[in-house]
Amino acid sequence: MTDAWYQDALIYQIYPRSFQDTNADGIGDLPGIIKRLDYLKTLEVDAIWLSPIFVSPMADFGYDVSDYRSIDPVFGTLEDCERLLEQAHKREIKVIFDMVLNHTSKEHPWFLESRTSRTNEKSDFYIWSDTIPNNWYAAFGGRAWTYDAERGQYYLHSFLADQPDLNWRNPKVVDAVFAELRYWLDKGVDGFRLDVINCIVKDETFRNNPKGFWTRPRPYDMQRHIFDRNRVESHKRLEQMRSLIDAYPQRMLVGEIMVELPGEPELAASYLGKNGDELNLCFDFSLANARFNAAKWKVIAKRWYEAVGKHRVPTWVLNNHDLPRFISRVQGNEQIARLGALFLLTQRGAVFLYYGEELGLSDSKVSRPRMYDPLGKHYWPFHPGRDPERGPMIWNTGEGYGFSEAEPWLPFAKSANRLSVENQELEEQSLLKFYRVLIQLRKADQALRFGITTFLDTTNTNIMAYSREIGEERRLIVLNFSKNRQYCMIPVWKDTKSICEPVFSTHPVEDEKQNAGRAMLLHPYQGTIYRLSDDR
């Protein structure tokens, strides 16, 4: 475990359409990412994760792949991709590709062949039925079964009808998918983020899903998804995939696990494998679905640690391309954003940042006519869609904000000039510089990187406190989740002889050292990291 680069990694997610445009079409591209690698190096990120860049009709903006081995022209060329890998590795930045393996585009050659005949080589690459066999719904609206007149059967799609589900019970499908992974591993890709990977195997007899108890507008959310995901056979397939990955040194898999809201950490952790032989990492989005509250965050964090255990690696994330940005969920409060960052970057495990999170980039305001996201289009106004969290990165002040010389594909966030990298580079107390200092501290501190996390009781429910310990190195982290000043007792570390020396804080700290057991005053949304030592 100690030589696994991902176990304490800082991984920066890039939505390529929105990061940097270099050919003046208003859409980000691979040369744009190459252009900004030096910026990413200043953040000291260990890896970048790119949302899908493969050839796609873009019905779901790359999550409907029609060719796993070619780069979509909107992003560039295969040569651009190879240059990105070369230049990132030159800067000691690893590259993770987003692989969508539950389904393909209906324009993928596999599906085009499968629909022509019930007996050809690809006939069972997808899931077909003479009738609609059950009550399953698609996540993006309507029934999960669509009739194909050419083949004269219905095919299964868990999302759009443009995204037919692969038949992972067919060993030939497994071989074909693994060949696509090998292609990119051989080119030097360092790992894969696996989209909805717990959905890959469905119930063999197509049993009906039981009704759920939710009242959200999607029929999909009104079922308990017992038979269209989380089948036991999916774990076997992931064990096989892990064996493939482990044949290449220092590669990794991180999986998105589709769960019932607000989160199922035990289910997510199960895809790491009982012996750590499935995914290397997996996401739990419970924090992203929780109110900003000390008690709630403590319960979620403890539950996640317990689900993962001491010998596997937890991941920490507050937002991504499918979830509203954290700062927008807290109404643009930058103090809370700093406290959230301090919490995230003082946990054991891998931390994922979403592009612009280090700037305080908020969701863009996207009107109905400018909306692209199929989920939003179908469920508007009940669902705002996912376009707002996918707005363009803000690099400079002025027209185009350094993102593009053309009209961007989505509108910029508000306060773009103030939030820009250019502006924040000039401000000593900017959020960007706060992130850099905190990241540098994390990377230099063994206790913050690898130490055991222990949550501590406090005398104030607005305060969260926890320690990190490895060998003789001990840290205490104290966070005030309240908008008001709060007093609390510093949690005692084994005895009252411990001394707390501040090493980092969101606010000025009055006392350089404090005795454990003494009352502490915390400013609104203050978070402080202390070094614990024994005064004897």
Image: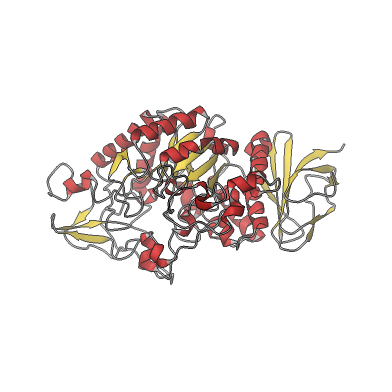
Identified at 43% across, 62% down, the residue is 385
Using the rendered image of the protein, determine whether residue 256 is visible from the camera's viewpoint: yes
- Is 78 located above or below residue 156 in the figure? above
Identified at 48% across, 29% down, the residue is 89
Quadrant in the picture for the C terminus: top right
Rendered image quadrant of residue 436:
top right
Identified at 60% across, 45% down, the residue is 422
Number of numbered callouts drawn:
0
Locate residue 365, reporting x and y percent. Answer: 49, 63
Q: Nearer the viewer, residue 271 or 125?
A: 125
Quadrant in the picture for the N terminus: top right
Locate residue 429, reporting x and y percent. Answer: 70, 48
Left of 265 or right of it: where is 103?
left
- Is 294 located above or below residue 270 in the figure? below
Q: Nearer the viewer, residue 309 or 333?
A: 333
Locate residue 413, reporting x and y percent. Answer: 53, 57
What colouring method underlies this structural image?
secondary structure
Left of 384 or right of it: where is 536?
right
Left of 208 or right of it: where is 464?
right
Using the rendered image of the protein, determine whether residue 280 is visible from the camera's viewpoint: no
Identified at 48% across, 37% down, the residue is 35
Left of 477 or right of it: where is 50?
left
Locate residue 30, reporting x and y percent. Answer: 41, 39
- Is 43 located above or below residue 289 in the figure? above
Q: Nearer the viewer, residue 75 or 25?
A: 25
